[in-house]
Image (cartoon, grey):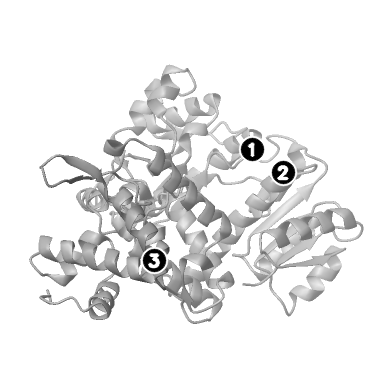
Amino acid sequence: MKPIWIVDDDESIRWVLEKALARANIATKSFSSARDALATLQHETPQVLVSDIRMPGTSGLELLQKAKVMHPDMPVIIMTAFSDLDSAVAAFQGGAFEYLAKPFDLDKAVELIQRALEESDREIVAESSGGEAQEILGQAPAMQDVFRAIGKLSQSNVTVLITGESGTGKELVARALHRHSPRSSQPFIALNTAAIPKDLLESELFGHERGAFTGAQATRRGRFEQAEGGTLFLDEIGDMPFDLQTRLLRVLSDGHFYRVGGHQPLKANVRVIAATHQNLEQRVKEGLFREDLYHRLNVIRLRLPSLRERREDIPLLTQHFLQQSAKQLGVEAKRMTDAAMQFLSHLELQGNVRQLENLCNWITVMAPGQTVDVKDLPPELLQDGKNHVASQDSAPTPAIKPEVIAQTKPVVTAPAMNGNGGESVSWAALLDTQATQLLAEGKPEVMDVLSRQFESTVIKAALKHTHGRKNDAAVRLGIGRNTITRKIQELGIAGVKDD
């Protein structure tokens, strides 16, 4: 990945951003003037450009303008200590990815730069694939329902509301709805309503006339005009300011709008697809979202499942993201061991598919070898896994889901039966007794002996349950086919059928 360029005449700002991005494993290159950055831009290109707006000599806005001419798809973030509307409008008019007012929260600045990196990666993938749209992956029943819904809506122009947790792929679904619609040859315009400052959002949506406010030096088309004939995707609609909701409702109701400062109504021939991770019904009750707008948007609702609801897709998605990341970096794709893949499949990934994609990017760059085991995963992920297992251990036995039992510590007290038909001690207690006896007798390699007995017993039970079908047994146990084949051979288990 190419480095992030930081352009600022303030050495302390450059130093702070360099250190913060280094902690996030993001390479940087710094410049004290826009002139030096422009000179380097003749023969090098950053992944993302972060520039101050007011510097001696060439300004950040001039740098933005010239950089966009040379590299139109490169995200540019403008920083300024003068958080006024004029500067913000000028930055967005020039095509800035985002506007960052000083003093800024360092964590939020890094998060913004990471979002710009994701945008840059999407552009690179689109270019390398010849403009082909990214498809949605998923074999889980919940995702098949989504695919069927997209198919049913393929010839429709109806408004759609997409709900789901952050990182579930709402924009991908919106793009798929557009791609398979009668409007597919027309523009798809996306706008994150939560990412645009409130004072700029109205202008972003509807455009403005020249002289509408200080800094509006030319007429500007808004997103509704840019999406004419196509689809406008309004992401995080639940965070839209209340007064702007009224203007959006009017457009959806009668199809007309006015630019900011304009007096001539404009006709909007646009399909609106909205998305949110918020509970809109609750926001309506709290008076934060207009009920009439909610009903205008909620014509057809698509709910995207969280990754926790489609764990069976995690191996497929992981393999895809590892290959995608390797292709971007020009390296060989990493491979996950069965144990590592099983570990990932049982994690509570709150960031959903986006978090998994970021994890795969981390693995591609940071994992030490081509084959990735559990120990090679990020330390914070391993800690999350331990916490998850511990919480499962402390929960009452009936609350533990069957698919989780396989990866928890062996403390589930499935009762054994004694010779008189009554309940005896748990198998974990019996294991403790057996281990204590072997250790007392001074037997060598106790761990290896007990592990082989444990594995042999469990695999034989699974094979008995599946009538000797090896692949079915692997699925039941939650391990890979290669793993169970190797274990059967190592343990000398007979009576196995190939499915």
Residue located at (34% from left, 54% from top): 433
Residue 278, image x and y in percent?
44, 33
* Rendered view: 185 above or below 498: above
Question: From where the camera sits, is residue 107 visible?
Answer: yes
58 or 102, which is in the foreground? Answer: 102
- Return the mark for residue 197: 1
Residue type, mark 3 in image? Glu
Residue 56, image x and y in percent?
92, 57
Mark nearer the viewer, 2 or 1: 1
- Return the mark for residue 455: none
Residue 151, image x and y in percent?
22, 53
- The residue at which mark 2 appears reads as 88
* Rendered view: 67 above or below 305: below
In the displayed structure, does residue 352 sit left or right of residue 480?
right
Residue type, mark 2 in image? Ala
Mark nearer the viewer, 2 or 3: 3
- Quadrant (top left/top right/bottom left/bottom right) for the C terminus: bottom left
Q: Residues within 10 Å of mark 2 (few under 14, many from 20)?
A: many
